[in-house]
Amino acid sequence: MLGQLPPDTGKVIGREAETRRALESLRPVSAPADPEPEPGPGERAGARGETRAAADLVVTGPPGAGRTAFACHVARTAYNKGWFGGILYVDLHDGGTHLPDGTKPGNRTARDSDSGGGSGDRAAHYALGALLRSLGAGPERVPARRAERAALYRDMLAHRARTGSRPLLVVVDGASDAGQVLPLVPPDGAARILVAGRGPLPGVEGPCRLDLGPLPLEDAATLMTEIVTCADPSDPRTLTDPGALREAAELCGRLPLALAVAATALVDRPRTTVRKLADELGKAAARQRTRPAADAAAGPGPSGPGASGPGPSEPGPRHPDPPGLRAAFDLAHRRLADDDRRLLRLLSLHPGPHLGVDAVATLADLDRADARKRLETLRRARLLRVCAPYEGYRLPDPVRRYAADRAGTDGSAAELATARGRLLAHWAATVHEADRRLRGHRDLDEARTGVPRGVFPALGEAVRWLDAERPALVAAVRYAHGAGEHRHALDLARGLTAFLDLRGHRDDWEAVHLTAAEAARASDDRPALAGLLEALGRCRMQQGLLAEAAGCWAGAERAHRETGDERGRQRARGLILSALQEDDRTGEGESAAGDRERTGDGPGPGNRGAAAGGVPLLTAALEAYDLPGDGPVRAALLDRLGALRLRRQEHDAALRCHREALRLREGAEAAEGADALGDAGRSLLGLGNVHRARGAADEALRAYGRAAECFREAGDREGEARARYNSGLLHIDVPGVRALRGLRLTRQDWRSAAGLLRREDVRQARRVEEDLAALGGLSGRWTALRGHPFRPLPPPAPLPVAAPSLPRARGGDAPPGAAAGPPPGDPRAVRNPERLDSEPFGPEHLGPEHLGPEHLDPEHLGRCRSEPELPEDAHALAHALDPAASYHGEGSSVEPEEYRGPTVGHW
């Protein structure tokens, strides 16, 4: 159950007191107490208060101090004692990816309306998504915004606690600031949290804070002795010269990682004495002390897209790592063979947190067996770690920084650029073939791609490879764009689209497509940009971010316009219209919001569309619908926008919207007859509402009268009732009108409105009759009457479903959304085998005739993720192989459970 945690180092030397204090801080109240530990120099006590920054245990320390190993050892020990029902582990540092120096990170991918969206927000955003999936939330239940994720995370933990389950232990590794930790703090009593920080972590307090520094000198020497005697119990070298051993430990800074590297050097060289080891460490430390001055004299190092090393040097220390740690690395590096040194330099180019053997072989231009052999050499030298359960290796951050420095000083820019190109080309070609296998293609083109035909003999191999390499592939897109390899970034993004959609990795989907869109802009590839924006809009639509989705599709429409692709432009316009239809379906549309205001229901927590996303959504739609025949659609959009502007008290803007809509509708009256009259009545009704809000009673009365006449001629009883109701409401407000005459006119209009509504909408008719009764009760009390909260009815402005530019469903003329079925993922959902053809996957390859009802069905586009165009066995296999980890390097020891508690937001 604990396979997702980093491997346990077993025996902990020199941290016994810290281990006791850490376990004491995590001990449940009901557990028997150990003897009271003595306070140590690394502990800083503090009471757990009301602040959400409080953690049960905070572990910090410099690089190489063994912070992660210590935290995982404590977590495993506490779990084995039966204190917790499971462990949730997340590494925040992996969320930022390990981009080599000289590359830019790309677009910000964490979307959060509550904060600035910095690196801390991005790490917390990804971590919350991973934790939610580990707790059993499916992709369709993971919200898009960080604040909502944090609320659902706390809700799920509290729900688990209410069911009587043992509390969980949340292990947060790699934290660098308090902002990353705050959203991950569980509610009191639901779980405990252990935070391992990469810095001092100011603002994160708790009952126990351990600052792991260098080991005591005797413990450091003992650690080196343990490593040597574990390899060969008969080796007496560390026992015969204790003075040299302590000197060597001191030169390593008494840091566990440096001590392990130095001790391993003794193991690998049986004839090397401890004194000689200490002398070599002393020389390495002297080189480290003189290196900053030498770098400053040498001037700027290699930089730019072709370089991996650091840029211009600054006088003084360049590295955050302790000198003893880098001295130990220098010792290990000098003992490596030339080919192993070259591999270590090239490993700094790898952008992902995990190193796969095939990727390393391609990077270094080696065969797989040779690459495995050299990786094992680096592992035995303690410069690499085995990465479980992933079948590969992990490069510790201090070693990565050291390797990057070596690449900048010992390697050539041409060698680094060539190796980087090999790796990116290999990934792009392999992703392409995995994507083709995922979509059911069997004709893998070995001659064109260079990928061996048997690399994915079955679908399962392709899915497993994509699951394992996903963190590196996502990082590779950012790396390729930052290094100027825009074509590789585009190829990787296109190849990953179907897989990320299938697995529901929407955070990675968004990150990949945002970065690839930047690469398409940088390379001026408009067709690729259009396809990427369409896919990105689909990702955001699945998360309920309608305005953001419409913005993406509006950008795709502009890109299609620039390339002259009218077919793609029509498709993008139809997608924007589908977002508006989804806005109506979820009860967040303009008229729905107006009805809630009218009835006093008010906007609920899940009905924020009109207030939060209405203007951007409608603006994007208006930008896209500007063809000569788009007058009716534009008029409907303008009326909706005018109603929204009115509720936001933007009267002048609302007036302009309704006047422009009326102009467009009146121009189409002769051609369209009664339909145009009803449309003009809607614009006039909205115009009357604006005039009433502005205090222009005469203009409002004229607009309402014209609207009622248009609705009557068009046979629209509901529209006529709304116009008459609003006209009657205005009679009460007209200054100078005698009270009795105003009441008589109001009763007359409202009775007429109620009679019309009885045939169309019984509920609204009842509302009008209730207002009539209230009007009679307030008769004679004019001040109270004018203060009563009567509200005008908004115009019924339905979106034209069968607009000329909206893509039709294949196989008939039914409007989109007419054939709604079970949501994706529902066992009752039946996929259409006729769609499984050999065409490339992705919206950039789909014309209007390929957009079936499932593409535009609001039930499909809004709440649930869409099913990519994949064979049935791909979907079945994806569910069967659903990986336990959905985040870069994290996992969970808790079995996923079905969560049916309260939900937050609109997912």
Image (cartoon, rainbow, N blue to C red):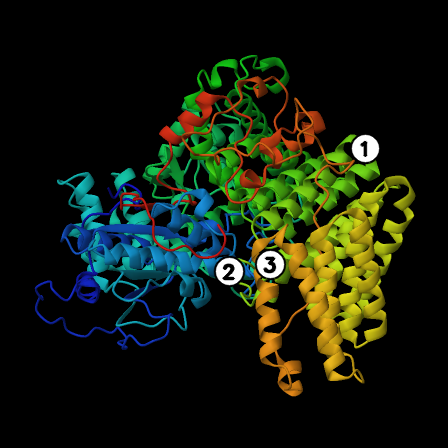
Q: Which residue has dot 3 on it? A: 764
User: Could you tell me residue 204's position as x and y percent?
Assistant: 37, 70
Label 1 neighbour load within 10 Å: few <14, some 14-19, many 20+: few
Q: Nearer the viewer, mark 3 or mark 1?
A: 3
Specify whether 98 is left or right of 715. Answer: left
Residue designated by label 2: 121
Would you identify the image quadrant in which residue 891 lies? top left
Q: Which residue is mark 1?
A: 566
On the image, the x and y values in percent for residue 749 come to 72, 66
Q: Mark 2 or 1 closer to N-term?
A: 2
Residue 241 shows up from this direction: no
Q: Would residue 160 appear left or right of 783 to someone viewing this image?
A: left
Query: What whole-number distance in Å separates the C-alpha atoms at marks 3 and 1?
Result: 43 Å
Give the amino acid type for the residue marked by disc 1 in the picture: Glu
Foreground of the two, 562 or 32: 562
Q: Residue at x 53, y 59 (%)?
A: 119
Looking at the rendered structure, the secondary structure element under dot 1 is helix
**Residue nearest the observer in this picture, 390 or 777:** 777
Relative to 359, say whether 37 is above or below.
below
Identify the residue at image location x=68%, y=47%. Answer: 550
Give whichever of discs 3 and 2 has the lower sequence position.
2
Indicate the amino acid at tag 2: Asp
* Residue 883 visible within the image: yes
Residue at x-position 77% and y-position 72%: 692
Q: Position of residue 728 (x, y in %)?
A: 73, 70
Q: Quadrant of residue 861?
A: top right
